[in-house]
Image: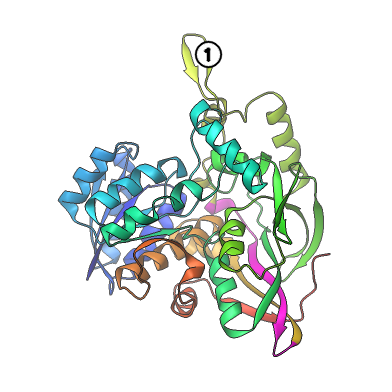
Amino acid sequence: MKKVLVIGCGGVASVAIAKICQNSAVFSEMCIASRTLSKCEAMKAKWQPTTSTQISTAKIDANSKQEVVSLMKKFQPDVLLHVGMPYHNLVLMEACVECKVHYIDTAAYEPEDTQEPIWREKYEKRCKEKGFVAYFDYADQWSYFDKFKNAGVTALLGGGFDPGVTNVFVAYAKKHYFDNIEYVDILDCNGGDHGYPFATNFNTEINLREVSSPADYYENGKWIGVPAMSIKREYDFPEIGKKDMYLLHHEEIESLTKNYPEIKRMRFYMTFGQSYLTHMKCLENVGLLNSTPVKFGEHEIIPIQFLKSLMPDPSTLGERTVGKTNIGCIFTGTKNGEKKTIYIYNVCDHQEAYKEVGSQAISYTTGVPAMISAALLATEKWKGKGVFNLEEFDPDPFMDMLNEFGLPWKVVENPVMVD
């Protein structure tokens, strides 16, 4: 029986916590920790009556390595599941190395202030060398490989859906359907409607930073950069219909093209409605997407964090959101010397997710695989000493658990391709 420390108590965390409670066969104890103890206590009160997993709570500053280390020495977890802000990734990784605890997150590290001079200089040098421009990549976390190897534990990066499940889809496709994968398009469609003029379906700050940053894709060994939201396609998604989607930078492309060097081209698309794009552009034009602190009266504020405080909390959208998500990968490659195309995807219903765990499908599709990743590490069905992405492990047990815990997937032969 294993012990898991969950850092974070937002929308994704709430789903991961619910799913950990459903998996008492693996997790005998869970500690929920965040800066707001009352949220942790509310989660415990909600789920403890439903599970034999023993739940405890703690107040913690995830930016304080010492606080995290102290809590881990007290609780002694087998795994730390980080489902909070990616700003904290490096601090939590440091703590896991010191305490020899497995680490999992759901998004690549990025700094809170992307204009901080020391980080910015290092990052721009890296972008120039690699050829892409966005506010997040894996280099800082990959640099911890030797530290985790020497500590004898695993860091698993990007254990949500995209990145996460999409990475596993690639590994599964290669293992079962292709001798060689040449082209991959990752498609993320949210066909849901929450009824607000403007709201984000996951953390407002991270969502807007991701969408408004320059985009790129990988082709023939190179990164090709383009302005944000400048490449648009329409696609007819199963169970949803036709939606406009836009090319974005997304971190799984970086790890997947590294681990599958035979891939000639990889792109990532996400759907957006025109109302969302119009609101975002207006906010960007007046500076509210900026992450650099500014003076407001006697106080210093970060514009995008101030905007976040005015926006609907994504964790409250579940009850009012209707529709479905469709997230998957379209593959082209060869098998036994013949061309082959398949589409692996999951469809998740917002209202069904809400009925089960009280969250909309965006949080659900990230929280479920986060729990699965933690379970596979805790039980050593996935094991390795160092820092890894999900595609580096056997995809089969992960794919089986997706079906078991609420994210069934489909494989379609000869799908419509993205032009």
Q: Is residue 189 above or below residue 277?
A: below
For the residue pair 171 and 244, the one nearer the viewer reads as 171
* Residue 15 place in picture, x, y as percent: 43, 58
Q: Quadrant of the C terminus?
A: bottom right
Residue that numbered label 1 is attached to: 295
Q: Is residue 390 left or right of residue 63?
A: right
For the residue pair 358 and 393, the one nearer the viewer reads as 393
Q: Is residue 402 left or right of residue 20?
A: right
Residue 322 lies within the magenta run: yes
Q: Label the magenta part by its dominant secondary structure.
A: strand
| Residue extending farthest top | 298
Residue at figure coordinates x 54%, y 75% from the top left:
408
Span colored in magenta: 318-337
**Residue 226 appears in which quarter of the rendering?**
top right
* Residue 173 place in picture, x, y as percent: 61, 78
* Residue 329 place in picture, x, y as percent: 66, 69
What colouring method underlies this structural image? rainbow
Residue at figure coordinates x 33%, y 56% from the top left:
148
Q: Is residue 168 left or right of residue 72?
A: right
Residue 71 lies within the magenta run: no
* Residue 79 place in picture, x, y as percent: 30, 60
Q: Amino acid at mark 1?
A: Lys
